[in-house]
Image (cartoon, rainbow, N blue to C red):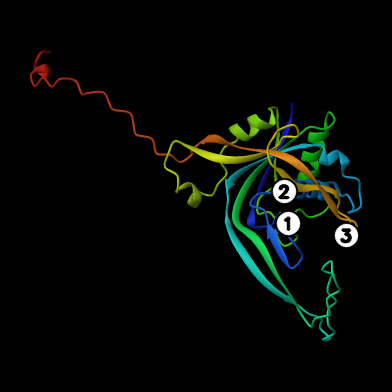
Amino acid sequence: MSTLLLLLKGPLQSWGAGEVNRRWTHHHPTKSGVVGLLAAAEGRPRGADLTDLVELTVGIRVDQPGDLLVDYHTVSRYDGVPLPRAEDGKRTQPPKPALQTRRHYLQDAVFLVAVTGGTPGRIGELDTALRRPVYPLFLGRRSCPPSVPVSLGVHAVSLDAALATEPWHAARHHRRKYHDDVVELPTILDDPSGPGETLHDVPVSFDQLTRSYTRRRVRRSTVLIPHPDRRRTPATPPPPPPHDPLALLED
């Protein structure tokens, strides 16, 4: 079994959710975000078929949750012409001179993503594409580029094993908050037959006019990862030999 590991780390990330005027973010990468990242690496146009990427199994580990940042925006035309507004389901709203939006981001977050499945050799192809992407890669939105190479390579282990054995990638300032020998990290995994919760984040199409999503079942769990900086108590040195002040005189 081959599993591709991705390290999603950058100053800002935003994994879309919510209505147009208040752009929420999930607290972890979405499957649509991961699929979009892979599709961009392969150079797929927005209207391309995503079936093979959607069928991949995805698991996420939260190495560093980050903090929420809300960015307030106003949008208007340079010539002062009022902006049209979308219908609210009951009536069409009148144009406004400016629109207000609040865009939510995760700042200083780090996630480990495991991807497996597909036809033989498919995982290796995705690894190659991520190392030489056709389109720029971003962490949910175009304003959120990664700060490190995304691919951590292909590992010959299962998805669960990859999430449980890969070293902790949190920043040092975050690791200082934990003082035990191991740290417990949350995970979110695809689980089609499980009784867990559902997330509405599986892309059908990224086309701007026909963008749509379906649901998937996920399983939330945790893994225990060794703390790389834990200062262990040094071993007790052996007792010194008994002192004999006359030992040097025996020769």
Q: CA distance from mark 3 to mark 2?
A: 18 Å
Residue 134 seen by the camera: no
Instruction: Count neighbours of disc 2 (C-alpha within 10 A) and say few if under 14, some if 14 to 19, many if 20 or more.
Output: many
Going from the N terminus, do you reach mark 3 or mark 1 first? 1
> Is 41 displayed left or right of 15 in the figure?
right
For image coordinates 85% across by 84% down, the residue present is: 81
For the N terminus, which image quadrant?
top right
- Would you name the residue on which mark 2 appears? 30
Residue type highlighted by circle 1: Gly
- Would you name the residue on which mark 3 appears? 208
Q: Using the image as rendered, state which of residue 80 and residue 86 is in the foreground.
A: 86
For image coordinates 84% across by 86% down, the residue present is: 79
Residue type highlighted by circle 2: Thr
- Would you name the residue on which mark 1 appears? 16
Q: Residue 231: x percent and y percent?
A: 39, 39
Going from the N terminus, do you reach mark 1 or mark 2 first? 1
